[in-house]
Image: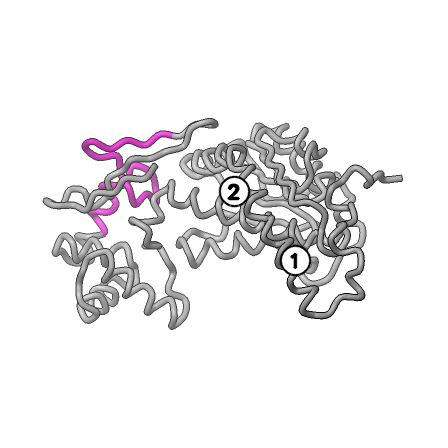
Amino acid sequence: MIDLSTLTTERRNNETFNLDQMTVAEALIKMNNEDKKVAFAVEEALPNIEPVISSAIEAFNKGGRLIYMGAGTSGRLGVLDAAECVPTFGVPATQVIGLIAGGDKAMTVAVEGAEDSLELGRQDLIDLKLNENDLVLGIAASGRTPYVIGALDYAKEIGAKTASLSCNLNAEISKHAEFPIEVDCGPEFLTGSTRLKSGTAQKLILNMISTISMIGIGKVYNNLMVDVKPTNEKLVERSKRIIMQATDCTYEEAEEKFIEADQDVKLAIVMLLTDCAAEEGKTKLVSLDIVPEFFYCVAQGGNYSHSRNYYSFHMIPVLSYIESPPEISMT
């Protein structure tokens, strides 16, 4: 028999004992008050999130991947975050991957027993041809999902980096990961429903991991997503605005270079700031990349460093060879 009595996520919430008797307005206030606690709980976990981001950057720089693994809500959140990296940062779908116990069909319909299999987690990584350059992040609100544990153990066997994200303290999966993250949001509004506060906390943390690691490999210029993929009308217009904001050009100039650059925002920015044609701009980008897909380079006065316990970058953008480049400092 599985003992859930020690899990915070399974405890009853004293504030919602009479939930079924509340008015809609009362329930909304209670639920909103519970949700307010999530960001503060995540804040306490920031020191443990930092080395996971550093490890993700290191993995990307080695040509490795960030792989999320989970079951149920945890798995779906990983798949969601991975999918959003493609249009937001222009990375291939193979760079950030979300795996859910039971496969793609489990995104909409629960697959019975999938999360309880140690072997399934292991096999999913074998099928993905996991290697030592990859980082596997196991996600489980309960902190005890066998599918995730099996995956983490296999990742460690072959020398890949491992991290975990749970919503209970002293979680079982923390014992199987090099970089464990534990966030305690307290009992759920609805007892045991970890799609609520636990899911919100997981989403916030995944946002941090994917976004800041992408900043670390040069996918952001200042605070602009310069590698955005314009896959719809909204993103086409956003791309033009990014070009305008990065170069202080007019809408018409941005649109012209955007078209000439074949909708490559980063290239259009280089073309405008260096007054060059598309082919020359491509050459300049390639010649200044110190790592594939890096937008930033370590230039005069700039440095880049990261480790398990330290993560910072003070970098000058790849456009730094321009006579009067905009200076960027991130700490």
Q: Residue at x 67, y 32 (%)?
A: 153
Residue 219 drawn above or below residue 315 = below
The quarter of the rendered structure image containing the C terminus is: top left
Total labels: the figure holds 2
Q: Identify residue type, mark 1.
A: Asp
Label 2 sits on what residue type?
Answer: Leu
Q: Nearer the viewer, residue 250 or 42?
A: 42
| Residue in the foreground of this view, choosing between 80 and 2 | 2
Classify mark 2: helix, strand or loop: strand
Q: Is residue 119 visible?
A: no
Query: In terms of sequence position, does the residue under pointer 2 or pointer 1 come before the other?
Result: 2
In which quarter of the view is residue 250 placed? bottom left
Crowding at mark 2 (Cα within 10 Å: few <14, some 14-19, many 20+): many
Q: Which residue is mark 2?
A: 66
Q: Residue furthest left?
A: 323
Q: Position of residue 284 (x, y in %)?
A: 20, 47
Left/right of residue 10 with respect to residue 282 in the rendered view: right
Note whether residue 114 is visible.
yes
Q: Is residue 24 above or below residue 164?
A: below
Disc 1 target residue: 104
Q: Secondary structure at mark 1?
A: helix
- Image quadrant holding the N terminus, namely top right
Q: Quadrant of residue 252?
A: bottom left
Q: Position of residue 49 (x, y in %)?
A: 52, 37
Residue 46: give x, y in percent of width and height: 51, 37
Residue span colored magenta: 282-305
Which residue shows up at 28% across the image and 65% down it? 240
Compute the Cα span from label 2 to label 1.
18 Å
Q: Nearer the viewer, residue 191 or 221?
A: 191
30 left or right of 254 in image: right
